[in-house]
Amino acid sequence: MRLVLYGPPHLRLDGRPLSASAWRTQRAFQMLVFLALHPRGVERDLLLDRFWPGRQAAAGRRNLHPTLSYVRSVLPRASVAPIVRESTRYALDPAYPMTCDAWDVDQALDEGRHAKDSRARRAALERAVGFATGRFLDGFYSDWADELHLREQDRMSKLLLELGELCRAAGDHEEALSHFRRALELDAYREGTSLAIMECHVRLGNRRAAMVEFDRLKTLLRTELGVEPLPETEDAVRQLLSGDAPADTPEPRRRKSVQPVAGLRAVGSAQVRLKGAGGESRR
């Protein structure tokens, strides 16, 4: 049994997705996901606040236990119950036989933090991004899911940038380019990522592709933000295209207080933490 949270969230039994109709309400499935992302457990009041906010609190007090009971009834029977309760705190039992791609990402990142050298760290980070095969919590449209999605998007962007740097330092520019492109999909306005992509193209002998990437960046910034690339970016691009590039392309400073014309949402401080982001571990 596997809980998949990258891409549209779903539960897989014997390798096949469990039909959405198996859940009486999506709230029950989302509560399973919420518990999975809080391995140390969740207080009753937090569950009520997240799933029955505001004036729905009275309904939440009536429906919390039936909803948790329904989650238990959908999950396959095992030697231990899937959900344990200690006073007013609820958690998934770590002994329950279920895996989750989000847990695998966190474990790989933890291994990367303790890696003894750059090669081992790169291998761990590659495992992490390999598990993250889609948009986190894709299709969940609640406030708590938005918070977690934004937090994970920021974390995955940083992970891909570091992995790209490790590959570039090892002279593996093809792999570096792949990771930098994925990072750019998560933050299209980050000029340093575009610079890293341009450098990879130049190192691979594709100067024209680097020029195309710079044109894409300029068009995006002008159309969406009404600004030009930072002076540091333009200086670095001139050096790259002149063949006089530094060994390490400089990272331009980040823009402050600039929002896309199209209204791209800024990353806020999530009140709900991803499992593992702050040292939290399932086991």
Image (cartoon, rainbow, N blue to C red):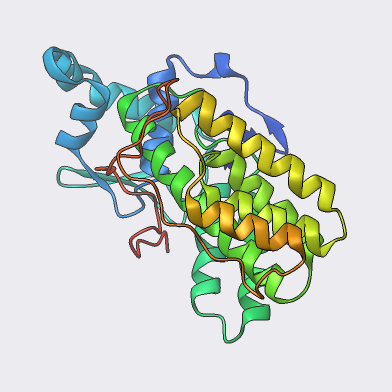
Is 153 placed left or right of 255 in the picture? right
**Quadrant housing the C terminus:** bottom left
Identify the image quadrant of residue 151.
Answer: top left
The x, y position of residue 152, in whole percent, is 45, 45
At x 58% / y 48%, what residue is drawn? 101
Q: Which quarter of the rendered picture does the N terminus lie within?
A: top right
Seen in the picture, residue 136 relative to 260 is either above or below; the reply is below
At horizontal 61% and vertical 38% (from top left) the residue drawn is 217
Task: Give the x, y percent position of residue 65.
Answer: 25, 27
Which of these two is toward me, 23 or 34? 34
Is residue 12 shown left or right of residue 25? right
Can you say whether 120 is above or below 97 in the image?
Answer: below
> Residue 46 sits in which quadrant?
top left
| Most foreground residue, 166 or 24 | 166
| Front-most of residues 118 and 13 | 118
**Image height of 134 relative to 115, above or below:** above
The image shows a total of numbered marks equal to 0
Residue 246 lies, in percent from the top left, at 65, 73
Q: Nearer the viewer, residue 174 or 3?
A: 174
Quarter location, residue 146: top left
Residue at the right extreme, as displayed: 205
Residue 121 appears in the picture as rendered: yes
In the image, residue 262 lies at what x, y percent?
A: 45, 20
- At a point 66% along the width and 35% down the height, the residue shown is 216
Residue at 66 percent across and 76 percent down: it is 247
Q: Is residue 13 visible?
A: no
